[in-house]
Amino acid sequence: MKTRMTIFASLLLASFAFTGCDDDNDDNYTPDEKIVNVLQEKYPNAQRVEWELKYDHYVADFYLDNIEKEAWINAKGEWVMTESDILFNDLPQAIQTSFNESEYKDWRIDDVDMLERVELETVYVIEVEKGKQEFDLYYAEDGTLVKTIEDTDNDDNHHPVTVPEVLKTAINTQYPGAVILEIEVEKGITEIDIKHENIVKEVHFNSSNEWLYTSWDVKRKDVPANVMSTIIRDYATYEIDDIDYKESADGSKLYIFELEQGNDEIHVKIDTEGNVVK
């Protein structure tokens, strides 16, 4: 999964337009009873509860079974997200194994969070750093690395997000049985990370909610022989760094190779017939 800077999908809907933090500095602040009841119903054994306002949401910081948690409730009185601060050793074993076999295994682990959000599958975020570099690694419960985000602003807060019904319908139609893992918006393009047929796929929509393309990582052994033969024939002196498969709304289906030769890096597109596409 390639590293990229992202803007969380908190900008996706006007109702989640986070224009600034509206924190209440009163240590004794408590929201309306209906909001408090939502927390009590979901976490009846919550202890040491403290409330504050963040981005038009009521946020409860509390402890449950000695785990620090942060629950977000919207103005309608609906639970939308809980962030739990957990230990690396408390991660699902599949995630621990995946991380320990990754290129980040020797990086310092700064923090580990579990994110539970309405309508989205649970994901786990491992924050790592090395020198001046910091990344957030998002994992599905089965150990699949969903995405890697460079942390450039030291923002440790995760925000609740929602998936518009029109996009959920489009995904369910095109990728039956898919589960939604993440959603984000960058430069007007909505990217939704899904898991479909045991593959993490990135589905992209434009600002009109029209499907543009879907891409996912492909292993060399899964590339058709006719496609690989073109690479071997025309780019024999290059090393394969990464391979993506991309299917687009215009009907095109391409394998995109990231190739390296010394300091030279190129991207080569090859269609399913084995032809290089310019």
Image (cartoon, rainbow, N blue to C red):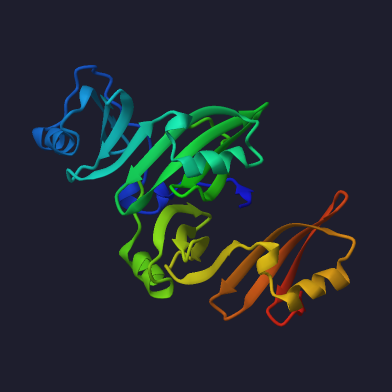
Question: From the viewer's perspective, is 16 left or right of 175?
Answer: left
The relative height of residue 165 versus residue 137 in the rendered view (above or below) is below
Can residue 159 be seen in this snapshot?
Answer: no
Side of 254 relative to 46 (left or right): right
Residue 99 seen from this side: yes
Residue 154 position in % (x across, y down): 53, 30
> In this figure, what is the number of numbered marks?
0
Residue depicted at 27% across the width and 26% down the height: 65
Quarter of the C terminus within the rendering: bottom right
Q: Name the quadrant containing residue 41.
A: top left
Q: Position of residue 25 (x, y in %)?
A: 28, 20
Does 191 appear above or below 15?
below
Asked which quadrant contains residue 109, the reply is: top right
Q: In the picture, residue 236 is in which quadrant?
A: bottom right
Residue located 52% across and 50% down the image:
144
Vertical arrangement, residue 250 with respect to residue 223, above or below: below
Q: Is residue 11 left or right of residue 40?
A: right
Q: Residue at x 68, y 70 (%)?
A: 223
Q: Is residue 243 or residue 133 the one in the foreground?
A: 243
Residue 234 location in percent, x, y? 87, 71
Q: From the viewer's perspective, is residue 270 above or below residue 87?
A: below
Q: Position of residue 235 (x, y in %)?
A: 86, 66
Q: Is residue 218 left or right of residue 277?
A: left
